[in-house]
Amino acid sequence: MKKIIFGLMVLCSTIFAGQVNIAVAANVSYAIDELVKEFNKTNSNTKVQVTLGSSGKFVTQIENGAPFDIFMSADMKFPQSLYEKKLAKNVPVIYAQGSLAMLSSKKLDFSKGINVIKDSSISKIAVANPKTAPYGTAAMEAIKNAGLEEVTKDKFVYAESISQAVTYATTAADIGFIAKSSMYDEKMVQYKENVNWVSVDPKLYTPIDQGIVIIDHSNSLVGIISDKMKNEEIKAFYDFILSKEAKKIFEDFGYIVKWVNLLQQ
């Protein structure tokens, strides 16, 4: 048995040494490459392994032992749930605030604002699954607060994540609710503001505060090894995401950054 445990430790140390595994909400997919690139300017020996997906699904994976070191959520609720279950080492800290937008491959009358979705020409509306994607929750809240819930209830096409909602918005649907950050990706340059996309009135939905936590694997074998070999690298990336350098990148991708030093380890 001792040989087996030792073998597993050697294997894990080989796999994870010099690597930080981060679970990243899909809306950050457009900014994450720049963030990692900037981080590696001062941490060139650390490989950042990025996994993109919906925040709700990440929580389930982490609860079942997924070896993520850091969780960058699309809201505060999901990382808070991990902290309350003692699966996160720190209380969630806001790293950015996201915004909703509407996108279409068609030229629509966006001067109507969110009311454009009730037009007869709109038969399918793409929305990220509100059960697992916070941006989907915000979209449904905006629709309800605008008094459009009843007239649009049969139009929804649900995406697994906010990044998939972007794809649906320009293919399978007439319009879609997306993360505004996606419009700052160079691949989206063909879509023009007020022609193909427009911001959703922020008064219609609760601010999308996005939280980050360090995952606590202290009760697992991987956690024991991680604590000994990777704590400094994990903390370095965590601190970077809350740094001025990262703040500038988030702002460049359309996020609102409220800088409050709430680091609590």
Image (cartoon, rainbow, N blue to C red):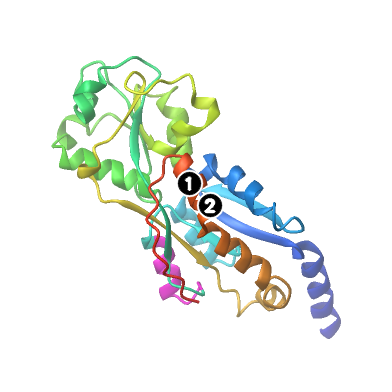
Q: Indicate the amino acid at tag 1.
A: Phe
Check disc 2 and report the residue beneath it.
246
Residue 131 horizontal/vertical position (percent): 36, 50
Most prominent secondary structure in the magenta stretch?
A: helix
The reply to whether residue 33 is in sight is: yes
Name which residue type carries label 2.
Ala
Vertical comparison of 85 with 242: above or below: below
Instruction: Give the residue drawn at x 60%, y 43%.
Output: 34
Residue 76: image quadrant is bottom left
Q: Nearer the viewer, residue 181 or 161?
A: 181
> Is residue 184 a member of the stretch shown in magenta?
no
Residue behind mark 1: 250
Residue 221 vs residue 199, the one in the foreground: 199
Range drawn in magenta: 78-88
Q: Quadrant of residue 232?
A: bottom right
The label number, if any, that marks residue 160 in the structure image: none
Please tell me which residue is depicted at 83% across the width and 85% down the height of the picture.
2
